[in-house]
């Protein structure tokens, strides 16, 4: 399916595009709010500045997709593959990314306020200056991620791996650090307010 066909059908009121092949499609700067792209193949697609508010992207393949400034507010991205995707300045407020793959994704300056990232894989992701306040990161893999200047205030980091992650001027105010792996993490330049790190959390911190 190409972009023209999808847009024509969407404008006619159709919303169900489950499992459609949209590899390399260019759908930038259009409104696709509420669209159902469950298990669709959007690998290497361009959807920059597109409105995908409330979209169903469960198990969608968005590998290496261009999603700069894309609005995913309230979208369902459970088990979605966003490996190496460009999500710079994307809006992902209150999205469900449970067990999603964001390995080496570029999320600089993205807004993930109150997002569900529980069990998600963010290994090696670029999260510089990202807003993760109130996010659920329980059980997530953030090993090797760059969290410079990120806001994680009030986030749930319980059972999360931050091994070898970069945390510089990261806001960790009121964060849940239960059973967090902080191996080879330097917390000296992070911002804390009311955070209590358990003895177990600090094992092997350097």
Image: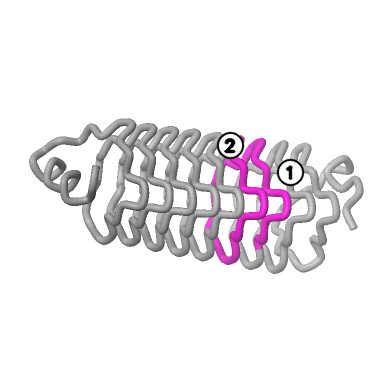
Q: Classify the position of the N terminus by image quarter.
A: top left
Q: Is residue 15 magenta?
A: no
Q: Residue furthest left?
A: 12
**C-alpha gap between disc 1 and disc 2:** 12 Å
Q: Is residue 153 left or right of residue 2?
A: right
- 3 or 163, which lies in front? 3
Q: Position of residue 162 (x, y in %)?
A: 74, 49
- 180 or 106, which lies in front? 106
Q: Is residue 189 left or right of residue 150?
A: right
Residue 115 sits above or below residue 70 on the image: above
Most frequent secondary structure within the magenta stretch:
loop
Asked if the residue under mark 2 is in contact with the one under mark 1, i.e. CB atoms within 8 Å, the reply is no
Q: Position of residue 136 (x, y in %)?
A: 57, 41
Q: Classify the position of the C terminus by image quarter.
A: bottom right
Toward which corner of the image does residue 152 lie, by quadrant? bottom right
Which labelled disc corresponds to residue 50?
none
Residue identifier under label 1: 161
Q: Secondary structure at mark 2?
A: loop
- 78 or 150, which lies in front? 78
Q: Position of residue 160 (x, y in %)?
A: 71, 41
Q: Is residue 142 magenta?
A: yes
Residue 147 sits above or below residue 141 on the image: below
Identity of the residue drawn at 61% across and 55% down? 125
Q: Tell which circle, 1 or 2, labels the residue nearer the N-terminal end.
A: 2
Identity of the residue drawn at 79% across and 61% down? 187
Q: Position of residue 89 (x, y in %)?
A: 44, 64
Question: Which residue range is magenta in the image?
Answer: 119-147
Q: Secondary structure at mark 1?
A: loop
Residue identifier under label 2: 118
Q: Residues within 10 Å of mark 2 (few under 14, many from 20)?
A: many
Identity of the residue drawn at 36% across and 43% down? 74
Identity of the residue drawn at 74% across and 56% down? 165
């Amino acid at each position: 399916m190409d972009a023209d066909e999808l847009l024509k059908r969407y404008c006619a009121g159709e919303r169900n595009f489950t499992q459609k092949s949209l590899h390399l499609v260019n759908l930038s700067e259009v409104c696709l709010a509420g669209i159902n792209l469950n298990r669709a193949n959007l690998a290497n697609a361009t959807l920059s500045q597109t409105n995908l508010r409330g979209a169903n992207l469960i198990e969608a393949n968005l590998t290496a997709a261009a999603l700069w400034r894309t609005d995913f507010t309230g979208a369902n991205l459970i088990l979605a593959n966003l490996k190496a995707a460009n999500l710079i300045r994307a809006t992902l407020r209150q999205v469900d990314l449970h067990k999603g793959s964001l390995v080496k994704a570029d999320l600089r300056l993205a807004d993930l306020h109150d997002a569900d990232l529980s069990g998600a894989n963010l290994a090696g992701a670029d999260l510089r200056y990202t807003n993760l306040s109130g996010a659920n990161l329980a059980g997530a893999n953030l090993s090797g991620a760059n969290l410079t200047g990120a806001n994680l205030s009030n986030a749930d980091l319980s059972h999360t791996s931050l091994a070898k992650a970069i945390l510089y001027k990261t806001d960790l105010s009121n964060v849940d650090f239960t059973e967090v792996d902080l191996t080879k993490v330097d917390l000296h330049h992070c911002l804390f307010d009311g955070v209590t790190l358990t003895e177990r959390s600090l094992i092997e911190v350097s």
